[in-house]
Amino acid sequence: MSAVILLSLLFAALGLLLQWSSKRLKVTGNALAERIDALLPQTQCGQCGYPGCRPYAEAIAREEADINQCPPGGAACVAALAELLGREPKPLDPAYGASKPPAVAWIDEPRCIGCALCLPACPVDAILGAPKYLHTVIESACTGCELCLPVCPVDCIEMAPAPELKSRLTGSHPDRKAA
Amino acid sequence: MNPPPFHGGLYLERHKSLTGGQPIQASSLPSLLVMPLRQRDGRDALPCVSLGDRVLRGQRIAGGADYLDPPLHASTSGRVLELKEWPLPLQGGLRGPCLLIEPDGEDACADPLSPLDPATLTLESLRTRLHEAGIVGLGGASFPASAKLGEDRPVIDTLIVNGAECEPYITCDDALLRERSLEVLRGAELLRQVLGARQALIAIESDMPRALHAARAALATGDYPGLHIVPVPVRYPVGGERQLVQTLTGREVPSRLWPAALGILCQNVATIAALYRAVIQGQVLDTRIVTVTGHGVRAPRNLEVRLGTPVYHLIAQCGGYTEAIERLIVGGPMMGYPVGDDGIPVTKTVNAVLAASRGELPAAGDPLPCIRCGDCAEVCPARLLPQQLHWQIQARQWPRALDQHLFDCIECGCCDAVCPSRIPLTAAFQEAKQVARMLQAERDKAEHARRRFEARQARLQREQQDREAAARQRKAGLGQGAAKIQDTLKKVQRKRLAQNPPPDASGRP
């Protein structure tokens, strides 16, 4: 009998401790959002339905958004988020778009009329230009979000395959694929 | 027996007698020179000649923008034919842009650089000279020699001149020491003085008696107070930079740091000889000594080769291939890589061409599963756990592989040599390093985009605030103006009242 009482008391105490620690030591939304944000591809394309990667990360942290809404990140991003959040990975939700190979925007200069409408559309300020001057895309800064495509009145922006990421030491090895 | 100078390593069959005894022979001019533009860091150097131009020997034809982009020089006079994709002497059968030069046979030289006076040579002028002469590490890694003398370099106490040619078959440094040890000694003394180093150690393997003898004889002819010739034990890979530092000084170069952190600078003997020629004679680096060896070639020997000479031209001068030829390898059997095309040109990195006959090198069979014998860990000179890395790479656990110090692997090939399951460990590590670098590049790009996005958000917010503040100010300004108008109106009214008072007020008195 005494054993039952003792164990009940012990478990009650431990339960209270758990309750208290889950309140006191909770990972705040901000810190979690930061860690989620670090796993997102930072394309800032808004395909997830949020105006950028950081807002999406905050939405995931608040458990408002699911982890499979990021087409640029693809399955790898979903897997990384699932591991961070301790959930089961799931396939990408096709409602938000399909995963595409990395691309960068490219302006067909003869067709550009210098309207400057694409400049404010770019989430990372990767388009250089001014009204009535030719615009150009800073390739190294472009994330391939495609947000500049719909605003162009003459459809002179196209998506080109992204250049290979070169590592500083040995250069790219296009012939060598990961094992 | 002495304790081993560093962890792991192997005693290997040397096969050096194939080419060991013979003098260096100058290679003839080929009918075509191929000058690859690819630099060590993956960039392609910018050519500074046009198609059809006549170039002279020693003339700069590409590169030279910064210290990590050493210039390339034409190695004979001739005409620039075209810029073409060509197989490169790099792992994986890569191709890259090359300038093709048709030699005209005159071998006319451009004006050499002006010789420098060793007595007044400063570190900065030496650095500039090494850069303009296109001198890179000739031991195989081809790190620009000028970049090793960078401004943020700590004080150098010891200069190590690496003549420990530990890889089997290769004898080009041995031949250089036998025939030109005076150049090496003078170059070493010059660099030591410019660096202000206490000593310069010339490391020569103890089974290279003739090189040792030649170097000692040369040392006796002059007064070199800071120079010491040190025989090092024959144990592969004693010629690895970190292993050599440990062998000579007993100190271990910390992971992720360079020997400079210990006040040590390492240079290959051939690099030092090139430095000497660049300073004293103003010669640019346009030749190198290449060991052509193996049982797949009739007359193995050391050739002094113009850079850009295709490998088939070297083979032809060594009597051609034998019937037993099986594989062509650039470099030695441990760290070299197979090439499928003998049209690849000799570059500053190509120290040997090994034409291996059937059965000469261990066959690359199908690997068996790892049995966790741990032999690889015992021989690893970097003290890694190759079997552990192997599992993590198979499981694609890149962060864990990095935690196991994947990037400390010097790719010496000792683990491959002892693996009873014949697992190609080094190749797996090389690929894993590539993948890790790519992932890092992706992360860097994402981080860059995130910073730009945040900067833009901050800017938009600031603009919005500025606009709101301006609007408030306008409103406030408008308020002040209205008050003024009110005041003025009141004043006018009062004035009017004073001038013509209302009738009821004026008619009262």
Image (spheres, grey):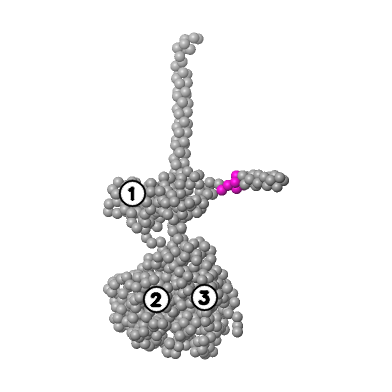
Of the residues shown, which amino acid type is indicated by label 2?
Answer: Pro
Circle 2 crowding by C-alpha within 10 Å: few under 14, some 14–19, many from 20: many
Give the percent coordinates (x, y) of residue B482.
Answer: 45, 29
- Count the numbered circles shown: 3
Q: CA distance from mark 2 to mark 1?
A: 47 Å
Q: Which residue is mark 2?
A: B338
Name the amino acid, label 1. Leu
**Mark 3 falls on what kind of element?**
helix
Pointers 3 and 1 in contact (C-beta within 8 Å): no
Q: Residue at x 35, y 80 (%)?
A: B311
Q: Is the residue B165 above or below the residue B435 in the image?
A: below
> Which residue is at the front of the view, B331 or B128?
B331
Q: Is residue A26 left or right of residue B104?
A: right
Residue at numbered disc 1:
A149
Identify the mark at residue B241; answer none if there is no mark: 3
Describe the element under mark 1 as helix, strand or loop: loop
> What's the distance in space between the residues labelled 2 and 3, CA to CA?
24 Å
